[in-house]
Amino acid sequence: MGLFTRDIESLDDLFLHQLQDMYYAEKQIIKAMPTMIDSASSEALKDALQTHLRETEQQVQRLEQVFQLQGAQAQGVECPAIDGIIDEAKDVNSEIADKSVLDSALIASAQSVEHYEISRYGTLIAWAQCLGKTDCVPLLRKTLEEEKAADAKLTGLAEQTINRRAA
């Protein structure tokens, strides 16, 4: 099912589809993060990515709770957007030899993922509120706050040390 198909006839259908999109995205992120962690040379960056990997695993569990609240099976739908962001991160990882420059590139890639997630979770929260799915909002909001915090942490690492080291 593509994003705009006859299967999506209501905001409720769109909400469910976006949940499936994010479920797929989070699972793909979990698969991709260990390579990023292994590629990082900065211990602070490794720690930040490792911490967020654990958070992402919890985010999948929260999405499963949201599916359950909707009476729906937790399943993903292919998300070309996250696939593209992850593919770009893989390319960056294989093309940059200088480890300090690679750390800056890894942060940029990770922040691309975070920004995608922030926009999607913000939308899911708005739709859940509009649809009266108030039981879903706290679960989605917790994840949104984690994504914002991860983005801020990455920005701090980049600005305080990693980008300077790369320069």
Image (cartoon, rainbow, N blue to C red):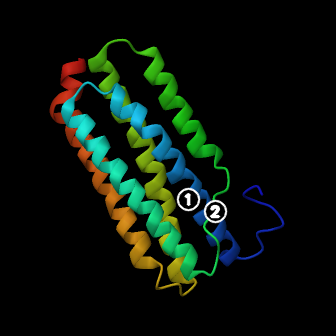
Q: Is residue 37 left or right of residue 13?
A: left
x 44%, y 78%: residue: 137
Q: Give the percent coordinates (x, y) of residue 117.
A: 46, 54
Q: Which mark is residue 75?
A: 2
Q: Is residue 88 above or below residue 70?
A: above
Q: Is residue 1 left or right of residue 163?
A: right
Q: Give the percent coordinates (x, y) of residue 59.
A: 42, 61
Q: Which element type, helix, strand or loop, lies under badge 2?
A: loop
x 67%, y 69%: residue: 14
Pointers 2 and 1 in contact (C-beta within 8 Å): yes
x 60%, y 67%: residue: 74
Q: Quadrant of residue 50?
A: top left
Q: In this view, which residue lies farthest toward the left?
A: 160
Q: Which element type, helix, strand or loop, lies under badge 1?
A: helix
Q: Give the percent coordinates (x, y) of residue 154.
A: 27, 42
User: Which corner quadrant holds the C terminus?
Assistant: top left
Residue on which disc 1 sits: 23
